[in-house]
Image (cartoon, helix red, strand yellow):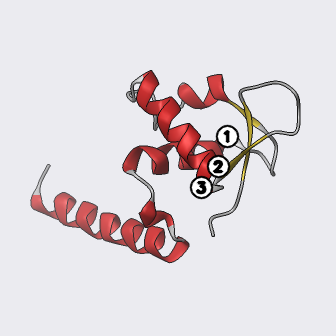
């Protein structure tokens, strides 16, 4: 990777960080953010997402299961995700950032 590519990457990272701050996502841990991004991507027009689809997403596939489930629980407690109204566990609805 040459310096031009690194400079572009640095600019992109600053832009992402600025957007996260604007949306109030900076309070989330990196794992929580990745899970939230993955959930938003998997959620088609507000449809529910399932845990097994989420845990296999590219953004979180290298996260350990215990860390994944702790972060998922935290996102629900913070209101970024909500359990689906269905009786089945493992289904979530993505809420807009506050």
Total number of numbered labels? 3
Q: What distance separates the C-alpha of mark 2 from that of mark 3?
A: 16 Å
Q: Are marks 2 and 1 in contact (CB under 8 Å)?
A: yes
Element type where label 1 sits in the image: helix
Numbered badge on residue 78: 3
Relative depth, front residue between 6 and 79: 79
Q: Where does the image place residue 21, in percent across and percent down from the top left?
A: 44, 73
Residue wearing tag 1? 42
Image point (40%, 74%), residue name: 18
Of all residues, the one furthest to the front in this rendering is 77
Percent position of residue 83, x then y: 76, 40
Of the residues tagged 3 and 1, which is closer to the observer?
Answer: 3
Q: Quadrant of residue 78?
A: bottom right
Which of the two discs, 2 and 3, sits closer to the camera?
A: 3
Viewer-side residue, 72 vs 15: 72
Alpha carbon of mark 3 to alpha carbon of mark 1: how far? 20 Å
Task: Give coordinates of residue 63: x percent, y percent.
Answer: 39, 29
Q: Using residue 88 as the reference point, say whether residue 79 is left or right of it.
A: left
Q: Which mark is residue 40?
A: 2
Measured along the vertical axis of the image, is residue 43 above or below residue 2? above
Q: Is 29 situated left or right of 44 in this image?
A: left
Q: Earlier in the sequence, mark 2 or mark 3?
A: 2
Q: Secondary structure at mark 2?
A: helix
Residue 50: give x, y in percent of width and height.
Answer: 71, 29
33 versus 14 height, above or below: above
- Marks 2/1: CA–CA distance: 5 Å
Residue 26, located in which quarter of the rendered image?
bottom left
Whether residues under marks 2 and 3 lie with C-beta atoms below 8 angstroms apart, the answer is no
Q: Residue at left 71%, top 27%?
A: 90
Taking the spot 80% from the left edge, 50% from the top edge, the residue there is: 46
Depth check: 47 or 82 in front?
82
Q: Give the residue drawn at x 26%, y 60%.
A: 9
């Amino acid at each position: 990777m040459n310096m031009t590519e690194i400079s572009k990457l640095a600019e992109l990272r600053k832009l992402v960080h600025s957007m996260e701050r604007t949306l109030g996502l900076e309070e989330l841990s990196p794992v929580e953010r990745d899970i939230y991004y993955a959930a938003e991507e998997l959620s088609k027009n507000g449809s529910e997402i399932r845990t097994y689809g989420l845990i296999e997403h590219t953004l979180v596939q290298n996260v350990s299961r215990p860390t994944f489930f702790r972060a998922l629980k935290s996102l629900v407690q913070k209101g970024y995700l909500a359990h689906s109204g269905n009786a089945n566990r493992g289904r979530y609805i993505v809420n807009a950032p506050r």
